[in-house]
Image: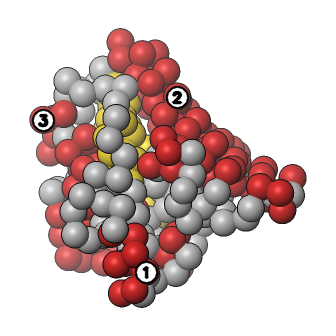
Amino acid sequence: MAVEEAERSVVVTGAASPRGIGRATATLLAQKGWGVGVLDIDEARGRELAGELAETYHVPTCSVAADVSDEKQVRSAVDTLEAALPPIGGLANVAGVSSPVDYLELTSTEWHRVININLNGVHYVTRRVAETMARNRFGRIVSVSSVSAQRGGGTYSKTPYSVAKAGLIGLTRSLARELGPYGITVNAVAPGPIDTDIMGGPLTSERKADLAKDLVVNRVGVPQDVAATIAFLLSDEAAFISGQTVNVDGGLYMH
């Protein structure tokens, strides 16, 4: 089944956080006319966002609560979104958790918590959505990695976070190769310091200034910086880009 641009939906995971990349992405895509499926563990905030987007931008929306680290919940949630929205043409994997624990203090519980949400969760959502995209012979998938994966940490979060986000880069490349024949592109973005709660709460002006010292621009990023890149990679203009990790990091990591 062909998926026309004017009648596509995007699933955005982790969209409910008030100051997050997911919310900025869902808002920008709704503004561009996409139907939006909100998949977030926070049921109340997810429903509130879906309502706001529908009212403001007059696009179809639906919100479902699910823990991305639980495959059964994920599959059920995507089933619900698929039944309520126009054909799913895009997926933005944004849900994630931070982990500032030093390696020598790291417990097995914390290791598995971070890997399960930040890596396994992306696989579970992507696996289910890719079934639909492959059937429709069209799809755009974008996952949020991190500059931490490329630099070996050096950010607020430490080793398990870096490992999970590095895994997303490998997953992105492999899926681009496997899913390309079905008309599906798969890419990642690697944000640097972005002013979101995943950085350990709102950034003070002093902390922003300190972080900006390592950048070649004069400020830390905002969620909209990353959302704009995700929206581009989900668009038809990016049809010839796949298997790539695009850094949105103010020049922190140049490779």
**Residue at position x 57%, y 52% in the image:** 153
Secondary element under disc 2, as helix, strand or loop, is helix
Q: Amino acid at mark 2?
A: Gly
Q: Is residue 68 above or below residue 220?
A: above
Q: Nearer the viewer, mark 2 or mark 3?
A: 2
Label of residue 237 in the image: 3
First reached walking from the N terminus: tag 3 or tag 1: 1
Q: Are marks 2 and 3 in contact (CB under 8 Å)?
A: no
Q: At which x and y percent is residue 174?
A: 49, 21
Q: Nearer the viewer, residue 50 or 207?
A: 207
Q: At which x and y percent is residue 120?
A: 65, 42
What's the CA distance linking mark 2 and mark 1?
A: 32 Å
Q: Which residue is mark 2?
A: 170
Q: Is residue 58 above or below residue 129?
A: below
What's the CA distance linking mark 3 and mark 1?
A: 36 Å
Q: Which residue is mark 1?
A: 207
